[in-house]
Image: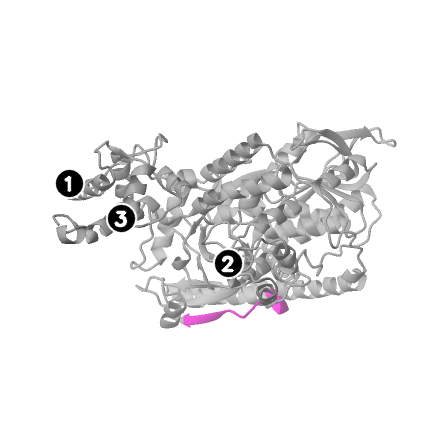
Amino acid sequence: MAFRKAVKGTLIGGGAVATAFGLSQFFEYRKHQARLAYVEAQGELKVPFKDALPTREEQLSTLRNTEEFDVLVVGGGATGSGCALDAVTRNLKTALVERSDFSSGTSSRSTKLIHGGVRYLQKAIMKLDYEQYMMVKEALHERANLLNIAPHLSAPLPIMLPVYKWWQLPYYWAGIKMYDLVAGSQCLKSSYVLSKSKALELFPMLKKDKLVGAIVYYDGQHNDSRMNLAIALTAARHGAAIANYTEVVHLLKKPDPKTGQEKVCGAHCRDLITGQEFDIRAKCVINATGPFTDSLRKMDNQKTANICQPSAGVHIVIPGYYSPDNMGLLDPATSDGRVIFFLPWEKMTIAGTTDTPTEVTAHPIPVEDDINFILSEVRNYLSPDVEVRRGDVLAAWSGIRPLVTDPNSKDTQSICRNHIVNVSDSGLLTIAGGKWTTYRSMAEETLDAAIKAHNLSAGPSRTVGLMLDGGQDWTPTLYIRLVQDYGLENEVAQHLAATYGGRAFEVAKIAQVTGKRWPIVGKRLVSEFPYIESEVQYAIKEYACTAIDVIARRTRLGFLNVQAADEALPRIVEIMGKELQWTEQKKKEELEAAKNFLYLEMGYKARSDQLSKTTEISLTAQEIARYKKRFYKFDKESKGFITTVDVQQVLEKLSIQIDENALHEILNEVDLNKNGQVELDEFLQLMSAVQRGQISDSRLAILMKTAEEGLDLRGPVSVDRSGGGV
């Protein structure tokens, strides 16, 4: 009965959408032909900064000294950067300011997917919602374009949908096939059905019980903050004046000569690095500030109503062994109805997302409840053989989605990700809502509205097919040339090619000689990740101003492993300090700010809370005795605590060499009261957390266990061997 009902619903929904689908395909074809007829070829666009970008100081000078811009974009996320690129390629004099760093907000904290939205298509079919259907169609078109214009930063990714009930197989298959059908000629690869055995072969971590099969479909995946940066840098190369760490203090207005009504004519800005304030005059100001949309709208008019309803989405990163290298997983029906993605990303596994109402903040913090919710859902569809431990969470972050408010909606899960373009009475343009994938079409629509509202002289959008920075000279085998020409490690070369595209050679040219036989150049920031020191120098050319910019957005180290990022920070600050001529005090401040960012925004706090003074020591008497014995092998004087000196002495007996600074870091992870020593109760709390799976990779626990085993193997030295008694 359930099977017939599901199939019947699918057939009726599919038939009802067929007419709309056919019409939309026809109109899309006509629209595409019109675009091809009017949009000039990419080669005809002027690129004044094809080789070297202007420095940030030069960009600020342009912003201060230009009499009037055609367009001023406020906001350096994906949408704001897209607006700047669309404007400048229409030959409009363009400026962009961002209060923090490019992609510092929502655009760097996504699920890393370029997708049309499978669940939105499901809603469109079940509710016969043509608007949602067209939103999915537009997103699928943009998905294809984004994969084309930034091939180094994006790629198709197969995603598996496991099926545990027989009646769901035709239901889900029909829905996924419709997804392929809507994509049309821009379908990445055709979806397909897998048997139970084949599904387990491709995704061996899956729970076997009751599994009847799986469906695999394709979406795109990208490095979101690097993609955002590529959009902004492409705009800068085409002549847009862009500046991060430049906030809008208030909007400038002047009376309209015809009506006398006050009109927005620019913004009074402050450079947050130097504190200098200046005016930027522009014919049109575009508000593309994401979650902060209403803040800028209220600068224009205090009485304006809010149009955004922020929603927090938390993601976690766990080790790469939790998922296959090139296969994601979608759980379409979690315990509370939310969708969870489980995806390989940057050789790790990313899981998320939650969807809960939140307050707008520039520094969202992932909360333990959301992290545990994701872990709980992951356990539901992974094999019992795979122990999903809280301690395996290497990083966690929260991103704020700027959803457009639907007054009829009872919760944020049912809010459509559609965008709106609004022009206020004073001429301020606002682009709000939408999703990462559709940033380009949103920007095009926004500029069309700006041109119409402000009578700007410009042609049609030229960003379809416009290659983003680094994409022009990229090839799948580019990394081989990096290995051969510069002597980089294979893994490092692949990373550089996938991050910088054709500009990877610029990073390789400034890489330091290692002094080893191999690799010849490219000193890593941390041993287990392919990020190298020359990337820090190059990041400054990409407008990085702080250590956080480097660990969070120029590289993704902070998003992948907070402890590794923390370990790399001193060297990053040292390199940046030399390049930017920082004082010792400035270096100290940068280091502290970056550590605070990792602690609060990247999940280190949630992680360290697993090992706190309030942690219950849930060990048996036998286990406590065993761990006390281990502890006192290091605390020879029975002081009740151990220091780096105590550990160093034991390691020297075993001929183990560890750098003193590294040893200090290892103990500091467990030193809860930060008094420079690890006390017995702190050690027992650590071992209790390890036992419960809350902590999985404590360097101190592993080091002390290894040392204890080494000491036990040595045993007492005999009189004959010691030379005693002779």
Q: Residue at x 77, y 48 (%)?
A: 239
Tell me the kind of residue under disc 1.
Ala
Task: Identify the residue at image location x=72%, y=39%.
Answer: 57
Q: Amino acid at mark 3?
A: Ala
- Please report the bounds of the magenta region as a residue range: 183-194
From the viewer's perspective, tell me whether residue 568 is left or right of residue 441.
left
Q: Return the residue at label 1.
A: 621
Q: Which mark is residue 707?
A: 3
Say few, some or many: other residues with alpha carbon within 10 Å of mark 3 (under 14 / 14 to 19 / 20 or more): many
Labels 3 & 2 near each other (Cβ < 8 A): no
> Is 154 in front, or is 168?
154
Q: Earlier in the sequence, mark 3 or mark 2?
A: 2
User: How far from the left and from the top, in percent, is residue 476?
Assistant: 59, 67
Q: Is residue 618 left or right of residue 485?
A: left
Hey, which residue is sitting farthest left in the picture?
725
Label 2 environment density (alpha carbons within 10 Å; few <14, some 14–19, many ≥20): few
Q: Quadrant of residue 187?
A: bottom right
Q: Is residue 161 above or below residue 247?
A: below
Q: Are marks 1 and 3 in contact (CB under 8 Å)?
A: no
Residue indicated by mark 2: 516
Q: Is residue 175 above or below residue 301?
A: below
Q: Position of residue 113 (x, y in %)?
A: 54, 56
Q: Which element type, helix, strand or loop, lies under badge 2?
A: loop
**Residue closer to the observer: 309 or 638:** 638
